[in-house]
Image (cartoon, grey):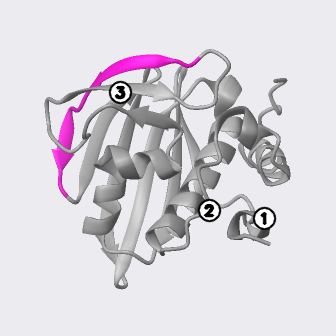
Amino acid sequence: MNNREQYAPGPASGAQVRKEGEKWTLVLVRELRHTPRKVWQALTDPAQLREWAPFEADGSLGTVGATVKLTTVGAPSPYVSETKVTRADAPKVLEYNWGGGDIRWQLEPSGGGTRLTLWANIDRHWISMGAAGWHICLDVLDHLLSGDPIGRIVGPAAMQFDGWQRLNAEYAKQFGVETPKR
């Protein structure tokens, strides 16, 4: 049995939703055992993003003003967007737009590792799905940085994964939203 076959995500936790009118923001917090510099590299380097993120990047996200093409992975009709990096304060804060919403990553030193916080604007109908997807992506990121890669789990492949389905239901319950119909 390989590492991916053994992988099962933990319970839905470390997430909240912030609502401002019609704007919904998913906030996920994860404690990682890796330094902010190591996590920053994984958030900005296209080669590392290919190992865990729900998108491909055609360039580095580590420079303010950089224009990078981001393409969803595994979707029947990949979504491609050109994004401009609006903030890249290494290894503390990274901001850019993806999928029509703002993405913000904050990295804070925490007990020899990093407290990673993600803010992602998302349509309220997809908030539990987004939380489940990012939860798994961050697990995959943690495995990658630990030298125990399990491979990217995104898009329709993630949605077929039992752990994703459980997380989607748990996050929907936590956020008080209906589980979206796929």
Q: Circle 2 is placed at which residue position? A: 150
Q: Position of residue 170 (x, y in %)?
A: 80, 51
Magenta residue span: 78-90
Q: Circle 3 is placed at which residue position? A: 97
Separation of marks 2 and 3 at Cα, in angstroms? 27 Å
Q: Circle 1 is placed at which residue position? A: 5
Picture layout, residue 158 above or below residue 77: below
Q: Is 181 or 4 nearer to us in this picture?
A: 4
Can residue 72 be seen here? Answer: yes
- At 44% across and 78% down in the image, what residue appears? 33
Picture layout, residue 78 above or below residue 48: above
Separation of marks 1 and 2 at Cα, in angstroms? 9 Å
Q: Earlier in the sequence, mark 1 or mark 2?
A: 1
Quarter of the image with the C terminus in it: top right
Picture layout, residue 113 above or below residue 127: below
Q: Which of the labelled discs sits on residue 55, or is there none?
A: none
Residue type at the position of mark 2: Ile
- At 80% across and 54% down in the image, what residue appears? 163
